[in-house]
Image (cartoon, rainbow, N blue to C red):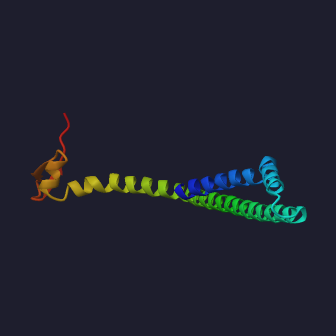
Amino acid sequence: MDRLNKTAAEARMAAFAAQTQTDPEHYGDLVGQAINARVHGPLEAMSQVANSLGVQSRHTDAVLKKAEQDKWEVFKDIREQEREIERFKTRLPWFGLGAVVLVFALAVLLPRFSAINSTTCAVFGGAWVQTTVGNFACVHYQD
């Protein structure tokens, strides 16, 4: 998400830079400065203005291309995250089924485990008693 935020911020900055580059008032100032200077002949001043406008135009074009590229990278990242979420959603029922099977197995095996020795029998609230044939068993008394 940090990368997406960073890319979006860069795209916004590029858009603002492009906005100032294409501002007619900015171009008017450039033309006005060139004409007011009158250091060089009128054709040379117009040539400088044309060169300056060309440089500004190329810079604006580069900024807009970078912003477009950043936008597509953000879209690509979002699509990849959506694919990962879909893969997780397809696996989620199997996790749930595994949990149900585990709970069922523990429910069946836990009483058997508690009957193995006197310690586990006592932990689960039973009593370790000797049967009539001489064997030991875990007995749970009910009130």
Q: Quadrant of the C terminus?
A: top left
37 lies left or right of 139: right
**Location of residue 92 in the rendering, given as x and y in whole percent from the top left corner:** 53, 55
Residue 69 picture quarter: bottom right
Name the residue rendered at 87%, 62% in the picture: 46
Residue 110 vs residue 131, the one in the foreground: 110
Residue 68 vs residue 101, the one in the foreground: 68
Name the residue rendered at 52%, 55% in the picture: 2
Decide: is 72 above or below 100.
below
68 lies left or right of 105: right
Name the residue rendered at 71%, 61% in the picture: 63
Residue 57 vs residue 51, the one in the foreground: 51
Name the residue rendered at 79%, 63% in the picture: 52
Q: Quadrant of the N terminus?
A: bottom right
Residue 134 picture quarter: bottom left
**Location of residue 112 in the rendering, given as x and y in whole percent from the top left corner:** 26, 56
| Most distant residue in the top direction | 143
**Location of residue 81 in the rendering, given as x and y in whole percent from the top left corner:** 59, 58
